Amino acid sequence: MNQTPPKKVIVVIGAGSIGQAIARRVSAGKHIVLADLRQENAKAAAKILSDAGFAVSLTTVDVASRVSVQALVEQANAMGDISGVIHAAGVSPSQASAETILKVDLYGTALVLEEFGKVIAHGGAGVVIASMSGHRLPALSAEQDAALATTPVEELLHLPMLQPDQVKDSLHAYQLSKRGNSLRVMAEAVRWGKRGARINTISPGIIITPLANDELKGPRGAGYRRMMDLCPAGRAGTPDEVGNVGALLMGADGAFITGSDFLMDGGVTAAYWFGELAPK
């Protein structure tokens, strides 16, 4: 008697434009579990994906809560084999305090990697959305890199380098978090590899999303416009361009890529270190 093979599940954490763009490229014939802190965001994204022919289930998740992330893992795992994880949730320096950024962007990402690393299917792959901000932070010591990469999740926020007297402001917290994301993914790639799965980060620059449009109108707007004008590409990016890289990293053509970080910022970081955007 032939048994129906288990359904393949793609978990998308963060219902924004970038998560959707990657999901559209890798989820045909699979079931999407779409999770966001705000149910209204998840509903809006689910309608777009459903109208495009994708099978979607909705749920809420708070990535800063282990209980919430574990509930998401259980819900997704009950639907089939988790073959893909797209982690695109987070808060920006204009949205939150340094403490909240470290809890959501740094601790939350480490938590997602740990919990989904326990269930990811053989042949599966994940992508974490980091940021070019992680590349603008000066080099950390080897000990600090190792601490961000390997400190047990529940001890992470107790690291001396992450205490209020060391983290200057919300932007510094964001840069540390995003550097930590890429380091954590490098370490987690070893553990995911033992299950036959892969995990990578993408570090986008200014990508035109509703959030970026808000930022362009906010106090950092002039700085962002200057980055767009003076970077080698001379423009911002689009979610679809990030989606293309996400599809490479999660698909068969990226089967030899794991533990890597892909910087795609139109050359902003290059111009920051070696060009017209260099600090005076």
Image: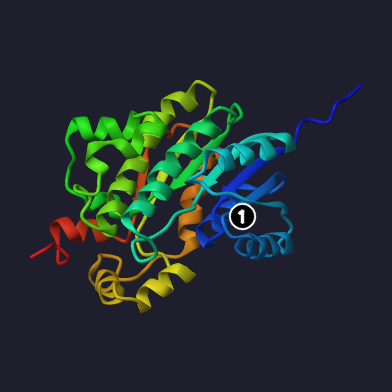
Tell me the residue at 24%/73% (across/down).
226
- Rendering coords of residue 25 (x, y %): 59, 52
In the image, 76 versus 161, the foreground residue is: 161
Is 277 placed left or right of 195 in the picture? left
Q: Quadrant of residue 195?
A: top right
Instruction: Give amino acid for label 1.
Output: Arg
Residue furthest toward the left? Answer: 280
Residue at disc 1, secondary structure:
helix
Tell me the residue at 53%/62% (across/down).
17
Taking the image as drawn, is residue 277 in sight? yes
In the picture, which quadrant includes the C terminus?
Answer: bottom left
In the image, 228 versus 78, the foreground residue is: 78
Number of marks:
1
Residue 199's place in the image compared with 204, above or below, is above
**Residue that carries the numbered disc 1 in the rendered image:** 24
Tell me the residue at 58%/43% (across/down).
68
Tell me the residue at 57%/39% (across/down).
67
